[in-house]
Image (tube, helix red, strand yellow):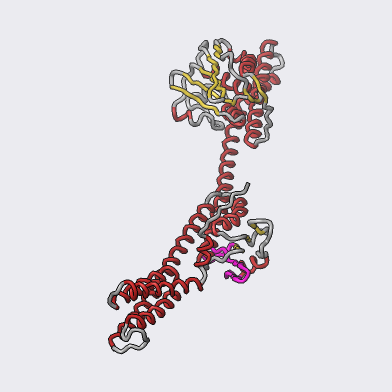
Amino acid sequence: MEIVDVSYNQPVTAMLSKPIPRYAISGAVVIAVVYTFHKLIHVNPTTVALSFLLAVLIVSATWGLRYAVFMAVVAALAFNYFFLPPVGTLIISDPQNWVALVAFLITAVVSSQLSERARREARNANERRKEVERLYSFSQQLLSTDNMAELLNAVPRYVVDSFDVKAAALSLPNRPDVYRSGPSSEGLEIHDLQLVSLRGEPKVDPANQLAFVPLKMGIRIMGSLGVSGGLLSRQTLDAAGSLIAIAIERAGTIEKLGRAEASRESEQLRSVLLDSVTHEFRTPLTGIKASVTTLLGNPSLDEPQRQELLTVIDEESDRLNRLVGEAAEMSQLDAGKVEFDLRPHAMSDTVREALHETKQILGQHPVEIHLPDDLPPVRMDAARIKEVLVQLLENAAKYSPADSPIHVTGEVKNRLVTTSVADRGPGIDDFEQSLIFDKFYRGRNQRLRVQGTGMGLAISKAIVEAHGGQVGVTSQPGRGSVFYFSVPVA
């Protein structure tokens, strides 16, 4: 059922907005004043004149000058006929009464004009205030996005919403499309927009309620704006055009800065990658080269020596292969080209698989596992999360003293399953904790003691974040570290 708001004052308000009823009411007020002071209450002419003057001021302040002037003339005639001697005629015998009558008429007209001017100025001030509020709201909307494509598509809609017009269109000389607030053109043709942009002067068609204004950034013209279904003041159109030009310039500058920053970071990353990979590749290649040279230069080596050199070649080849694999995986994760097979899995199964894979590197480290039996399954790519666990377990084994225990724990909180790997290593200071997950970063005191590329934790972070989780570390120098990651419950 549709609810219709019915106001019984609407017919009265509509009637009073027409000129004839207002003239009639103005005359009726004069008749009421005459009847009151002529029949009911007898007062001196000065009181009557002041009462007429007060009524004229009220009408002027309420309806405007023309009704007040009409009422002033009618009041002057009534004042002369009913209250100035000889009463009952329009003849004035005393010259002083002429002065009083003329003074009353002039005072009524002047005061009405002053009241009308005050009303007009108040109305203009109120309109300017509304325009300023609209422009402020419009400027805030323009700052809501820094993307150039989004901004250009949203500007016509912002214009319609902010300035209460029917349609808006935006055209830029370096773009072939016209950005509109709706599917229909509403008289905002592309040739008119282009013409205004070329001439740099606004074009207004009051008959069809069309207005076109150039988008100026200083003396530079960046395009044109067209509005339909409402006439805005020239000042508002110019201000809106300037705001749009500034917003477009700002979005374009931000995009350029973003591309420049991305290029700079890419170049920096390429340099760091090259430096790190070159340094890490040199060690296994040196070992492989030395072993091969020894084998080729000494064919008479006994079998144990040959076997030792071949073992070095095999281990260093595996290390080299792992370096290449980590670099390729990090590149794919950064580019978002890795697809994840997200399914419900038990974290305990993944932990056991990771422990089995790292059994050799864990060596003599006792591993204590504390996973609740009621730990809910999580939505994850089991192979990728196992890779994260393998990385954390290997780091715990590498950086911890021999035979020190490693603890693996799990808990659920806020629909997240958090898995932690704690060690008894040297710990990480507060400064390095904020850098430890960056690409190619390695601890200052450990980079020479333990081999690595600095990509393992960065890969782990990218994998966990792709699952919608978080990764972090809690550490105290000399007491060990706790690396943890959270994955949403399935």
Q: Is residue 428 among what the camera can see?
A: yes
Quadrant in the picture for the C terminus: top right
- The answer to whether residue 211 is magenta is yes
Q: Quadrant of residue 120?
A: bottom left
Residue drawn at the location 58% of the way across and 66% of the way down: 213
- The answer to whether residue 358 is magenta is no
Q: Quadrant of residue 489?
A: top right
Pick whichever, 220 or 195, lies toward us. 195
Residue 446 location, x and y as percent?
A: 50, 24
Residue 239 location, x and y as percent?
A: 51, 63
Pick whichever, 221 or 65, lies toward us. 65
Name above or below for residue 319 compared with residue 219: above
Name above or below for residue 202 compared with residue 335: below
Q: Is residue 226 among what the camera can see?
A: no
Residue 316 location, x and y as percent?
A: 65, 22
Pick whichever, 57 or 122, lies toward us. 57
* Chain part drawn in magenta: 199-222
